């Protein structure tokens, strides 16, 4: 019975692989170009209070929602390895994580470990985002980034060291260079009298973006951190709505079938809802 259910589930899932994934790349390049242009505009005084406010909103959007195309790139969903446009997949991944100053290599390696060891207290790099309720989860997204705290930052660093492979060493170096560029930009703009501008366009959006990502991607779909194929991730209803949750309400589908792109997971869930119910999944949220 279980084998037949799995066969039926997979047959449905295969219908939702692929699609217009080039849109992730196009949006990433466009948003990145606009975001970078905000810095010279701010330095030369073209933004003003209203422009800086709008720039903050846009930069925060890029920092938080840029993780969606990077997430697709991590799984090579934009263009698969071996495709002549695979470089577009990789470019999308690298550009989309720059606003949060996290190298794409580190993001990909740690994310693959998260899939492999979801909710394992020792091996899941995102396990420290666990919290008993939503407001403690929000606090945890900030606390886990503080120096000396055994949170996600420390886990990512330790994981790169423990892996000790050419890929992990390269990824760690890329993140180090990226963060040095970020700090250099902070210092340079502050030294030249534009501390407020760089704080509004990069430092603060990065802080908000990181918390937004960790809450909706790490905590909300995985709380209360159970184990098992149909238990470690859940279908949930976000009070702020589908888009505010970064479209993570159907994150279970991603863990079951990472090849289904983000924009097709909702459709895929409803197509296999009955099968998932018979597999023991709580489908009451949608």
Image (cartoon, rainbow, N blue to C red):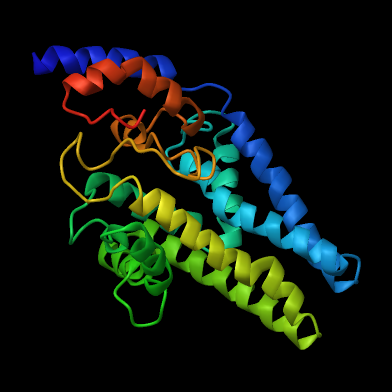
Q: Between 18 and 231, which is closer to the camera in this rendering?
A: 231
Quadrant (top left, top right, bottom left, bottom right) of the N terminus? top left
- The x and y percentages for residue 245 are 48, 44
In which image quadrant can residue 87 be found? top right
Q: Residue furthest left?
A: 1
Q: Between 227 and 135, which is closer to the camera in this rendering?
A: 135
- The x and y percentages for residue 95 are 61, 52
- The x and y percentages for residue 131 are 28, 61
Q: Please, is residue 196 above or below residue 6 in the view?
A: below
Quadrant (top left, top right, bottom left, bottom right) of the C terminus? top left
Q: Between 259 and 199, which is closer to the camera in this rendering?
A: 199
Residue occupying image coordinates x 55% and y 54%: 64
Residue occupying image coordinates x 54% and y 35%: 86
Q: In this orientation, does residue 176 appear?
A: yes
Q: Between 178 and 40, which is closer to the camera in this rendering?
A: 40
- The x and y percentages for residue 103 are 50, 60
In the figure, is residue 87 to the left or right of 286? right
In the figure, is residue 99 to the left or right of 191? left
Q: Please, is residue 80 above or below residue 126 in the view?
A: above
């Amino acid at each position: 019975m279980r084998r037949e259910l799995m066969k039926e589930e997979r047959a449905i899932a295969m219908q939702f692989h692929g699609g217009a994934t080039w849109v992730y790349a196009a949006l990433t390049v466009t948003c990145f170009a606009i975001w970078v242009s905000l810095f010279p505009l701010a330095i030369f005084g073209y933004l003003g209070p209203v422009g800086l406010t709008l720039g903050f909103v846009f930069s925060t959007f890029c920092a938080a929602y840029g993780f969606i195309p990077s997430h697709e790139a991590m799984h090579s969903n934009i263009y698969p390895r071996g495709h002549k446009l695979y470089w577009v997949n990789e470019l999308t991944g690298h550009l989309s994580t720059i606003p949060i100053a996290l190298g794409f290599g580190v993001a990909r390696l740690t994310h693959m470990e998260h899939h492999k060891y979801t909710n394992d207290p020792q091996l899941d790099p995102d396990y420290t985002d666990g919290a008993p309720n939503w407001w403690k989860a929000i606090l945890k997204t900030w606390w886990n980034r503080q120096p000396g705290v055994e949170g996600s930052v420390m886990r990512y660093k330790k994981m790169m060291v423990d892996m000790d492979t050419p890929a992990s060493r390269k990824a760690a170096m890329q993140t180090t260079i990226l963060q040095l560029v970020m700090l250099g930009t902070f210092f340079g703009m502050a030294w030249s009298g534009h501390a407020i501008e760089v704080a509004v366009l990069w430092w603060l959006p990065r802080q908000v973006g990181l918390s937004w990502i960790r809450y909706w991607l790490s905590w909300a779909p995985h709380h209360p951190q159970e184990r098992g194929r149909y238990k470690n991730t859940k279908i949930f209803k976000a009070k702020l709505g589908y888009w505010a949750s970064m479209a993570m309400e159907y994150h279970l589908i991603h863990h079951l079938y990472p090849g289904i792109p983000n924009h097709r997971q909702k459709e895929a869930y409803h197509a296999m809802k009955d099968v998932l119910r018979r597999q023991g999944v709580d489908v009451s949220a949608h």
